[in-house]
Image (cartoon, helix red, strand yellow):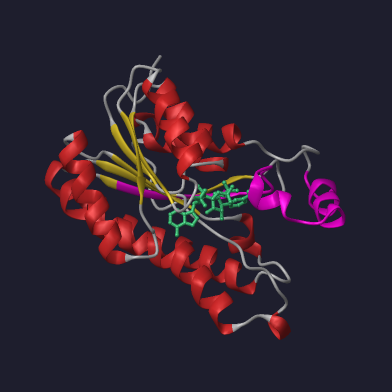
Amino acid sequence: MRLLEGKNVIITGASRGIGKGIAEVFADHGANVAFTYSSSEGPALELEKELTSKGVKAKAYKSNAASYSESEILVAQVLEGFGGIDVLINNAGITKDNLLMRMREDDFDSVIETNLKSVFNMTKAVQRTLLKQRNGSIINMSSVVGVKGNAGQANYAASKAGMIGFTKSIALELGSRNIRCNAIAPGFIETEMTAKLDEKTVQGWRDAIPLKRGGSPEDIANACLFLASDLSAYITGQVLNVDGGMLT
Ligand code: NDP
């Protein structure tokens, strides 16, 4: 069964990692996929080709999620090119890890702007379209770290915890128009983001996971598929932990 047949989806940050995994799974389920990247033009164009070959409409857009004006322009372009928007996935994110003692002000600001303000930018930009059609699903990619904190990631944890507050607020604001807003809190997912961590840290994460493995982008994509589709029609304002049991 194809769960997103003909739905138009925007995914931020899908040139690689989790975003790419979501784009692939969604295209397999019949969704048309508009997605963004920051600098990885080659991989983004390759993904556009791959998705198109699955028989759906797909387009890569270079757009800085941290910029409100770029987000507005992006949404206008997607509406023109795709004819509508049904699902928004706020996935773009960065880390700039350090202990507070060594964390620079711009390391804090840039992580908050890319991870958290981006969610405001994109949600506000799609809001009018979703309100008019009285239907829509917004999914925000938070993190286990936003739920429980992590030493050396105060900026990142604050951004991801902020996304949860934003998610619950928007669920309350837009629920009466049948627009749902949920967050996913991935645990340790094996992507370029986590490949930057040293082996000792990685082993520490793996040891703490009841399922004893890191997650894959597809594990997260399948949870997104559920939250984007009508299978979750009565679910809003929730945080779905997809973490191999880490928070248990
Ligand atoms: P990656 O670093 O592998 O990929 C990040 C993606 O975001 C890339 O496509 C990148 O584009 C894009 N991006 C970065 N900055 C911007 C920006 N300013 N505007 C638009 N796009 C941008 O990360 P992951 O796939 O691992 O993570 C995806 C999301 O999941 C993030 O929000 C992350 O915080 C969250 N997450 C990840 C976990 C993990 O274990 N991996 C765990 C919990 C949450 P480009 O390629 O052009 O740089």
Decide whether residue 194 is among the magenta residues.
yes
In this rendering, position of residue 80 left or right of residue 45: left
Q: In this rendering, does residue 140 appear at all?
A: yes
Across and down, in percent, residue 230 comes to: 34, 30
Across and down, in percent, residue 37 comes to: 43, 48
123 or 80: nearer the viewer: 80
Decide whether residue 93 is among the magenta residues.
no
Residue sitting at 15 percent across and 40 percent down?
Answer: 80
Q: How many marks?
A: 0
Above or below, 198 relative to 136: below
Asked which quadrant contains residue 190, the reply is: top right
In this rendering, position of residue 212 left or right of residue 17: right
Above or below, 110 relative to 4: below
Residue sitting at 70 percent across and 41 percent down?
Answer: 244
Across and down, in percent, residue 195 comes to: 72, 49
Which residues are drawn in magenta? Answer: 180-209
Q: In this rendering, does residue 173 appear at all?
A: no
Residue sitting at 52 percent across and 31 percent down?
Answer: 222
Asked which quadrant contains residue 55, the reply is: top left
